Amino acid sequence: GVVSFRVDNRTEDKRWDNLAAEERYDRLFVAYNASNEDAKLSLPEGNWVILADNQETDCRKPVALTDETSDRAFTVAKQSGIILGKID
């Protein structure tokens, strides 16, 4: 099966103030796909980058939409996870 959730990553902790804007993500989207098949999910509204996937961590690459004209669908590889950061 697949489980996904959003995380409010905002903080008032001053220790993070020294990070550059492109290194801070106020919202995260996390998905785990435990099935033996790739899963198609709908991307939440906004602009997102992949922070970690089944191939690498700290990658900061664009989300590849499977069909840009429909429901903003993207794929989570079988038996893997993905973490997205919102860049708005």
Image (cartoon, rainbow, N blue to C red):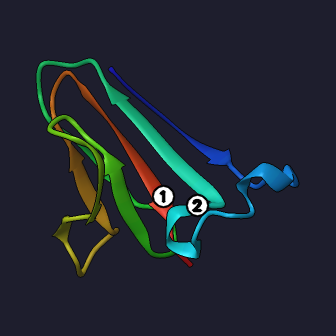
Answer whether labels 2 and 1 touch (C-beta < 8 Å): yes
User: Which residue appears at 59% of the width and 62% of the height?
Assistant: 24
Give the image location of residue 3, x and y in percent. Answer: 44, 28
Q: Of label 2 and label 1, which has the lower sequence position?
A: 2
Q: Secondary structure at mark 1?
A: strand
Q: Which residue is mark 1?
A: 85
Give the image location of residue 55, x and y in percent. Answer: 14, 38
Left or right: where 18 falls relative to 6: right
Q: As rendered, which of 25 and 39 lies closer to the eye?
A: 25
Q: Residues within 10 Å of mark 2 (few under 14, many from 20)?
A: some
- Amino acid residing under circle 2: Tyr
Left or right: where 15 falls relative to 50: right
Q: Quadrant of residue 65?
A: bottom left
Give the image location of residue 11, x and y in percent. Answer: 81, 52
Q: Which residue is mark 2?
A: 25
User: Which residue appears at 20% of the width and 21% of the height?
Assistant: 79
Q: As rendered, which of 14 and 55 lies closer to the eye?
A: 14
Left or right: where 23 falls relative to 13: left
